Image (cartoon, coloured by chain):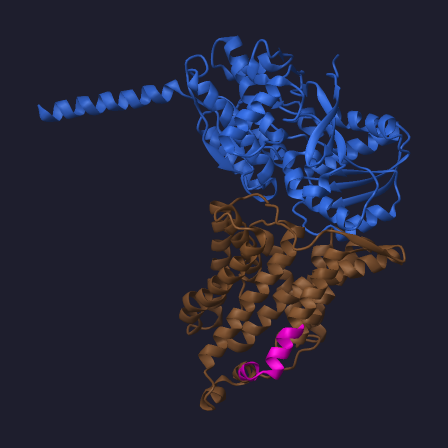
Amino acid sequence: MRIRVAALAAALCLGAVAAQAQQKVKMPIVIELSGAGAVSGTNFRDGALLAIEEINAKGGILGRKIDAPQSDTQSNPGVSRAQVQKALDGDPYVLLGPVFSGSVKVNMILAQQAEVPQITGAEGAEITQAGNPYIFRTSFGQQMSMPKIANYIRDGLKAKTVALLWVNNDFGKGGRDTFMKEMAARNIKVVADVSTESGQVDFAADVVKIKSANADTIFVYINEEESARFLREARKQGVKTPLIGETTLLSQKVIELAGDAANGVRGHVGLTVDAPVAAVLAFRERFFKRYKYLPDHNGLKGYTGVYAVKYATEKTGKFDRKLLAKTMHGLTITPEQEPGVLVEATWDDKGDIDRISFLAEVVDGKQKVVQILPKLGK
Amino acid sequence: MADLFQLLVAGLATGGIYALVAIGFVLLWQTSQTINFAQGEFVMLPAFFVLAAMKLGGLSFSLAILIGFAVSLVVLGLLFKRLVVDPMIRHGVLPLVISTIALAILMKEGVKEFYAADAQPFPALWATTNFSVGGAVISVQSLVIIAVAVVAIAALQYFLAATKTGRRMQATAQNPTLARILGIPVGRMILYTFLINAGLVALASFLVSPIYLAKFTNGETLGLVAFIAAIVGGFNQVRGAILGGLLLGVIDNIVAAYLSAQYRAAIPLFLLVAVIVFRPQGLLGRAEERTV
């Protein structure tokens, strides 16, 4: 009799655990938590977790709470592939991350084969050109952002020559190739083309090379930590030429790391918590209260990505991965429809995102938005 | 020409830091046959001692530097010798080398886990100003690094050559058995060497972290380049380590600017191979014979 009671109790417990597990929807975060991409990955992860906490506190998506196990790609494409495979083995609804283009390029095929929508913060141009119906960006691809920065160099700075400094990884190479095309289209001469290494710590020689090119402006396209080291070295060597960047160079983390050396830096930012948009500023406050640091654009990518999934899922009314991917193509979400997306965003048939963006400048250690650029589709 | 001059100054500053770290390799090897493959991480860690003192202890930067220096002497000098070297050295050089590799991993992962995985800003000891000489912009920061490295190395050389304790340390390095017979406290002399090494790496850490930013991976390249610098200069000569460090710093900058930034990391290795082939004892090293 006792055995029967015990067996019944055990069965009930198992049933309860299974039911609870079923109630949760899995959204694993596979991201750069160490290595060269730690800044980007940590911001993305924290942004996503903040959104998940908010959504879970309000009852989840369609009544199911989100479970978001995390794994570290170590900023290594090979490790990221293994971690994505491990995450996919857990039968997730959606995959969040990674941020580094090199990692996404090697692991997105796995998510595609498993028919799992993947929300990435990567900006490499070719990621959405591969015909993968399951990849979705939460920030501009380089093919969207480089024309904007090129227009600014031509019209805003009236530059005829530019010196280019880029990082020799998938993010940098994609950006460099797109930038060169945009410069050629505007008859702006690239007088120095300097490649640097991911994780590089000493920029003395690179700054000397860039300076000696005597260009009208210097365009810097490297990752956050390297951007800060470059800016410190540029300050050391007394560089006076305008330093222009695309998102990373003006990010909050770079400003924090570079200190005074970041002052005067200008450029285009796809996303920024300093944007003069009430919802974005409110997000900035919530993020700071939760994590005690100010997020960069990657924090916004993670946060808005989760809310985009929430909105699209509620629109379809069920947890169907294929249907989710199909729904997100061509989808526009306004803040009125889903406040968590913060600003209106549209995904095209390739998974590229379109939204407003900003021209900004670093003044007194703070990013100051000087102009809002409209959506490309408007 | 102005560019070359700028590169030379920047290279000497980098080389000065390599030299400080390389000297530590040589000192430990000479007195205790210790090859410390955690030497790079020894440079990484003091910066985090300082940051932790500021963040957790609420101390000012100058006070935190003093605390960081003192903690470095204890942890990277005294405790390293007592807890890692002393128990392992009796088993030979190889187990000790493996232990220091393990220690390096432990230190990196420890900082990543308990402090931060991303880079942290580290205040500069001086203002980042510059001045112009014949068209070349010279950074005061680089000059300060060179000056501090030169003073530290000169003080060390004076200590080793002109003080009683220094000469006892040299005697210990040359023949520990005979030194012991002559009444020199060999154990204490070896401990002094470890403390000097800890002081040198702490100094290197405070000089390099404002430029490289404080990050748990900082030791990887620094340790390797300093090790190569010590071999290139001569692993049994402090002046060899100085030459090796400065040489690598200057060559690295000039190669990156005029030849290839992509292959700059390979240059120290090419130099190492060339030295091993053509002058195995190093540029300023003494040939030593070993018999079986």
Q: Is residue A344 above or below residue B155?
A: above
Along the horizontal axis of the image, is A49 left or right of A250?
Answer: left
The residue at the point 70 percent across, 42 percent down is: A260
Q: Quadrant of residue A39?
A: top right
Q: Point out residue B31 in the picture as x, y percentages from the top left corner.
A: 53, 77
- Of A128 and B259, nearer the camera is B259
Q: Point out residue A79 in the picture as x, y percentages from the top left corner.
A: 54, 40
Q: Is residue B232 something that shows in the picture?
A: no
Q: Is residue B152 something that shows in the picture?
A: yes
Q: How many marks?
A: 0
- Of B151 and B218, nearer the camera is B151
- Of A63 and B124, nearer the camera is B124
The residue at the point 49 percent across, 14 percent down is: A320
Q: Residue furthest bottom?
A: B182
Residue B162 located within the stretch drawn in magenta: yes
Residue range in magenta is B154-168
Magenta stretch mostly in which secondary structure?
helix
Q: Residue furthest left?
A: A1
- Of B57 and B134, nearer the camera is B57
Q: Point out residue A209 in the picture as x, y percentages from the top left corner.
A: 83, 49
Q: Colour of chain B?
A: brown
Q: Quadrant of the N terminus of chain B?
A: bottom right
The residue at the point 34 percent across, 20 percent down is: A20
- Give the chain ID for the blue colour: A
Residue B71 located within the stretch drawn in magenta: no
Q: Point out residue B94 in the picture as x, y percentages from the top left corner.
A: 48, 69
The residue at the point 49 percent across, 60 percent down is: B71
Q: Quadrant of residue A138?
A: top right
